[in-house]
Image (spheres, rainbow, N blue to C red):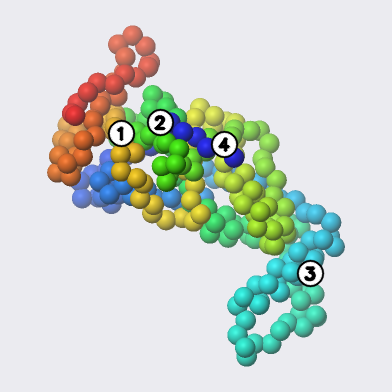
Amino acid sequence: MQYFYGSYYKYRVCGKRGSAQREHLARLITNREMMFSSPSRFNDPYDCHPIFVTGEPAEDRARIARARREGHARAAHPAQLKPTKGQESQHVSRVMAQLSTHEGAAAHFKPFLDRGTGVFCMSKDWRLLTQWAYYADYGKGLCLEYEVEPKSGFDRVFEVEYQIQRPQVHVARLLDDDEYRAQALFAAVITKASDWAHKQEVRALSEEPGVIVHPPGMLTSILVGAAASEDDITWLAELLREHRLKIPLYLARLSSESYSLERVPIWC
């Protein structure tokens, strides 16, 4: 696993004053609160959709039975009876039948993915016109610039791998192999279809979904879209002033000679 260090960018909408979007944005800037989402909430319905494979039937049955016994032992109450061999065999056969279909395998895979991974998505460049359109309200929003450094306490950031082939996941192996589970979940989350390569995406990962507070000083600048309203720019400047945050504001303005963007200082 190769960590990504350097600058990365989060495109965001501003939202209306008093809205939940505006409140979340304010907390992201002032409280440094990053929301790491469950992969099942991604916009792309084809994201985190690996190919599910099976192994040797006898080996898969042994893994399912072992996971069943270990799970029962962890959750067992003294008054509960240990499952009989017949009950265990029925359970194993039922899971084997489920894993033989894509839908059944996906149903077993999804809880591992959602419970064991939180993701904060960003891009490697603030000048991507498609990102301003998709995620920053057609240029009316903004882009937050972060700087990731080694040993900062917030450095599990990875470049997305764009491929034609989907990664493979052996679901039965997820049940009783912790090392394989970590590798499989990582591959599923960090791989996207090559059609999305223009996003130049990086992803910060956490062990579960939820809010993570990043270290002070990691947010180094805020770029405002060319179509942002004066009211939104005033709100941002007031927010920074109120919380005594020395974070420069820039306008992401279209160049007079090309379709590239340039930074124009607004407030420092």
The Cα atoms of the two marked residues, 1 and 3, are separated by: 55 Å
Question: Residue at horizontal 62%, vertical 81%?
Answer: 76
Residue 209 appearing in the image = yes
The Cα atoms of the two marked residues, 4 and 3, are separated by: 40 Å
Pointer 4 residue: 2
Other-residue count near label 3 (Cα within 10 Å), few / some / many at <14 / 14–19 / ≥20:
some
- Rendered location of residue 185, percent (x, y): 61, 50
Pointer 3 residue: 93
Of the residues under marks 3 and 2, which one precedes in the sequence? Answer: 2
Q: Which residue lies furthest to the top in this view?
A: 257
- Residues marked 4 and 1 touching at CB (< 8 Å): no
Front residue of 89/154: it is: 154
Of the residues under marks 1 and 3, which one precedes in the sequence? Answer: 3
- Which of labels 1 and 3 is toward the front? 1
Front residue of 173/131: it is: 173
Q: To which quarter of the image does residue 261 belong?
A: top left
Pointer 1 residue: 220
Helix, strand or loop status at disc 3:
helix
Q: In which quarter of the image is the N terminus?
A: top right
- Rendered location of residue 223, percent (x, y): 29, 30
Front residue of 228/31: it is: 31
Q: Residue 7 bears which disc, if any?
A: 2
Q: In which quarter of the image is the C terminus?
A: top left
Of the residues under marks 4 and 3, which one precedes in the sequence? Answer: 4
